[in-house]
Image: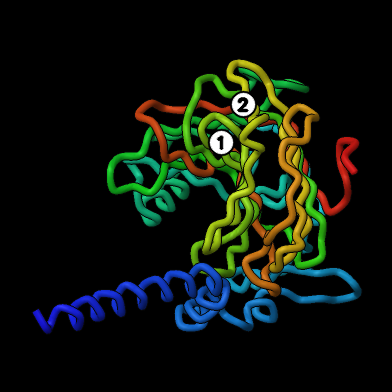
C-alpha cells in the first residue's frame, strides 16, 4: 500500500506531460509547422530566380525545356467560345496550359498524364471523366465548359476533371478577384470548384473554393488547412439545376491579415481575415477550374462553367 502514492504521482506526471504537450501544440502550432517545413523542405528557396525573369518592367515565366519565356498574366478571362474540343483550348492563344482527368481508370499521375497526351495527340477520347467545350448549357454566348467526374474508388484521394493555366502571377500584397458561373446538374459532396495554387511547392498549396455539405467555403490548402466558412446561422445552399454566380476576393498574406471574401449571386457569404498564402515568398501561378477535386459520394457529378475571370483589379462591380 505504501507504493500507491508513487503510482498516483507517476500517473499525474504522465497526464501532466501530455496536457502540456497538447497545449504547446495548440498555442505554438505555427512554430511547429515552420520547423516541419524546414525539415521537410517542400520547395526550392531559389525557385523564383530559376523560373522567372524580369525585363523592362515585364515578368516572364521561363520554360527551360522549350528554351522559351512567356509573359505572365494578371488578368485572364474565358467564355469557351469558338472551340470544338479541349485540344482547341490548350495553348498560348487561349492561355490554358493543361487539363487533368483523374479517375479509377487513370488513378495515378503517370496514368492521367499519359491519357492527356493521347487526347491532345488525337489518339484517344475520354475514358471516364470529361472536360470539353459544350453547347448544352451555355449561360452567355453559344458555349460553356462541361466537366464530368465519376466517383473515386477506395485508395484514391479524389477524382478530377479540370482545366488550368500556369501563366498567372499573384504574390504577397496583391488582391486577387475571381468570378465564374457554375451549373450543377446533380448534387455532390466535397467538391472543389476553383484552385489558386503555386506549382513550385510540393503538393501545390493554395486557396480554393469548395462545396462542403452543400454550401460554399474557402480553404487554404497548407497545414493546418484553415477553412473560412459561412456563418452557421445563415448558411446558404448552392442551387442545383440553375446557374449560380460565384465571386471571390483574396488579399494575399502569409499572416492573419489576409482578406477572404466570397459571394454567391451577389450576396456576401464569407468576409473574414486570415492567412491566404502558405509563406511570404509564394507565387500563385496556377488557376484550376471545373471539378478540381471530387471526393464524396458514389455517383458521377456533372458541372458546367462559364464566363471565368481572374484579375488583380476589381471585376463585376465588386469593390
> Does residue 4 show up?
yes
The N terminus: image quadrant? bottom left
Q: Residue shown at 65%/73% (left/top)?
A: 67
Residue 238, which numbered label?
2
The residue under the point 41% across, 36% down is 296
Is residue 79 at all visible to an observer of this figure?
Answer: no
Q: Residues within 10 Å of mark 2 (few under 14, many from 20)?
A: many
Task: State the separation of the CA atoms marked 1 and 2.
Answer: 8 Å
Nearer-N-terminus badge (1/2)? 1
Indicate whether 25 appears above or below 78: below
Quarter of the figure with residue 73: bottom right
Q: Which mark is residue 126?
A: none
Q: What is the total number of numbered labels drawn onto the structure image?
A: 2
Q: Percent from the top left, x then y, of residue 41?
A: 50, 79
Residue under the point 65% across and 79% down: 50
- Which residue does the numbered mark 1 point to in the structure image? 211
> Badge 1, how many Cα within 10 Å: few under 14, some, many 20+?
some
User: Quadrant location of the C terminus?
Assistant: top right
User: For this rendering, which residue is in front, 225 or 12?
Assistant: 12
Would you say 270 lies left or right of 120 here? right
Which residue ends up furthest to the left in the rendered image? 1
Q: Are marks 1 and 2 in contact (CB under 8 Å)?
A: yes
| Residue 49 image point, x, y percent | 69, 81
Secondary structure of the residue carrying numbered label 2: loop
Q: Secondary structure at mark 1?
A: strand
Residue 74 is left or right of residue 149, and the answer is: right
User: In the rendered view, would you say 230 is above or below 111?
Assistant: above
Q: Residue furthest front?
A: 2
Image location of residue 197, percent across then percent down: 62, 58
Task: Judge from the rendering whether residue 236 lies leftward or rightward of residue 58; answer left or right.
Answer: left
In this view of the protein, which residue sits in the foreground, 291 or 226? 226
Amino acid at each position: 500500500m505504501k507504493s500507491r502514492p508513487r503510482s498516483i504521482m507517476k500517473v499525474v506526471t504522465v497526464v501532466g506531460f501530455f496536457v502540456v504537450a497538447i497545449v504547446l501544440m495548440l498555442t505554438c502550432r505555427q512554430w511547429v509547422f515552420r520547423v516541419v517545413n524546414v525539415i521537410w523542405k517542400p520547395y526550392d528557396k531559389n525557385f523564383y530566380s530559376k523560373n522567372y525573369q524580369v525585363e523592362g518592367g515585364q515578368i516572364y515565366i521561363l520554360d527551360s525545356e522549350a528554351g522559351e519565356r512567356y509573359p505572365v498574366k494578371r488578368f485572364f478571362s474565358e467564355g469557351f467560345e469558338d472551340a470544338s474540343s479541349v485540344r482547341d483550348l490548350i495553348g498560348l492563344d487561349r492561355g490554358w496550359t493543361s487539363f487533368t482527368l483523374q479517375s479509377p481508370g487513370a488513378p495515378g499521375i503517370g496514368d492521367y498524364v499519359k491519357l492527356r497526351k493521347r487526347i491532345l495527340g488525337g489518339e484517344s477520347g475520354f475514358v471516364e471523366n470529361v472536360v470539353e467545350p459544350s453547347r448544352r448549357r451555355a449561360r452567355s454566348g453559344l458555349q460553356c465548359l462541361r466537366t464530368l467526374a465519376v466517383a473515386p474508388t477506395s485508395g484514391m484521394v479524389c477524382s478530377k476533371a479540370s482545366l488550368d493555366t500556369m501563366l498567372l502571377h499573384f504574390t504577397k500584397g496583391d488582391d486577387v478577384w475571381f468570378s465564374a458561373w457554375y451549373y450543377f446538374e446533380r448534387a455532390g459532396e466535397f467538391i472543389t470548384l476553383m484552385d489558386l495554387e503555386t506549382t513550385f511547392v510540393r503538393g501545390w498549396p493554395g486557396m480554393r473554393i469548395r462545396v462542403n455539405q452543400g454550401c460554399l467555403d474557402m480553404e487554404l490548402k497548407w497545414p493546418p488547412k484553415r477553412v473560412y466558412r459561412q456563418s452557421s446561422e445563415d448558411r446558404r445552399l448552392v442551387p442545383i439545376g440553375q446557374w449560380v454566380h460565384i465571386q471571390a476576393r483574396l488579399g494575399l498574406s502569409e499572416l492573419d491579415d489576409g482578406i477572404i471574401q466570397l459571394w454567391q449571386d451577389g450576396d456576401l457569404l464569407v468576409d473574414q481575415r486570415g492567412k491566404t498564402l502558405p509563406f511570404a515568398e509564394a507565387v500563385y501561378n496556377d488557376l484550376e477550374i471545373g471539378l478540381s477535386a471530387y471526393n464524396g459520394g458514389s455517383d458521377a457529378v456533372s458541372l458546367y462553367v462559364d464566363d471565368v475571370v481572374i484579375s488583380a483589379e476589381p471585376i463585376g462591380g465588386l469593390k
